[in-house]
Image (spheres, rainbow, N blue to C red):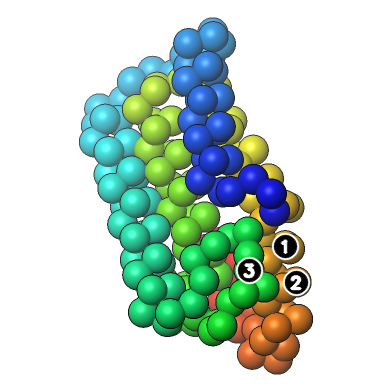
Amino acid sequence: MRIPPPLVALFCIGGMVIAAHGLPLKATKFVGSAQVGALCIIVGLCLVAWALAAFRRAATTLSPIRIDTASKLIVSGPFAFSRNPIYLGMAIVLTGIAALLHTIGSFVPIFIFVGYITRYQILPEERALKAKFSYSFEDYARRVRRWI
C-alpha cells in the first residue's frame, strides 16, 4: 500500500500508450468507439467523484494509504453496489482510454491495474477495515461485491 492508486492508474495509462504505439495488435475502429471511450471516461470520473463526495460527507479519511485512520464505514451511495467504487471508476476510465486508443494491447494494462489494486490495495484495506469495524464490515462484505 505504498503506491497511491491514482499513480498506479497513471502507470497503466503509460503502458496503454506504449502498447498502442509499440505493439502490432491494432484493433479495428468501430462506429462510435470515440463516443464509447468518452462515455466510459465520463462515467468513471463521475463514479470517483460520487465516492469522494461520500467520504467527505462522512468526514472520514480519503487516504488509501492510511486506511487505519478511517473513522466510519461508508455503505451508502456508490458503496451500496461496490465496496471499491473509486477503483472501479478508475478501471472504467482506463477502459475508456483503451477504447480511444483502438488497440487490443492497450486493454492489457486494465487487467494489470485490477490485479495489482486487488492484491496490494484492496485486500490490505479489507483486513484493516475488518480489524477496525469487525462485524459491521463482515456484514457489508457479504452484501456488497468487491468490484461490481
Mark 1 element type: helix
* Distance between mark 1 and mark 2 Cα atoms: 6 Å
Within 10 angstroms of label 1, few (less than 14), some, or many (20 or more) residues?
some
Residue sitting at x 49%, y 77%: 60
Q: Dots 1 and 3: beta carbons under 8 Å?
A: no
Q: Which residue is mark 1?
A: 123
- Whether 133 is drawn above or below 94: the answer is below
* Nearer to us in this view, 126 or 32: 126
In terms of sequence position, does the residue under pointer 2 or pointer 3 come before the other? 3
* Distance between mark 2 and mark 3 Cα atoms: 10 Å
Q: Dots 1 and 2: beta carbons under 8 Å?
A: yes
Q: Which residue is mark 3?
A: 67
* Distance between mark 1 and mark 3 Cα atoms: 12 Å
Residue sitting at x 38%, y 18%: 28
Residue 46, position as x, y percentages in the image: 31, 57
Q: Which residue is mark 2?
A: 127
Q: In the rendered image, is residue 80 in sight? A: no
In terms of sequence position, does the residue under pointer 1 or pointer 3 come before the other? 3
Within 10 angstroms of label 2, few (less than 14), some, or many (20 or more) residues?
some
- Is residue 63 rendered to the left or right of residue 135? left
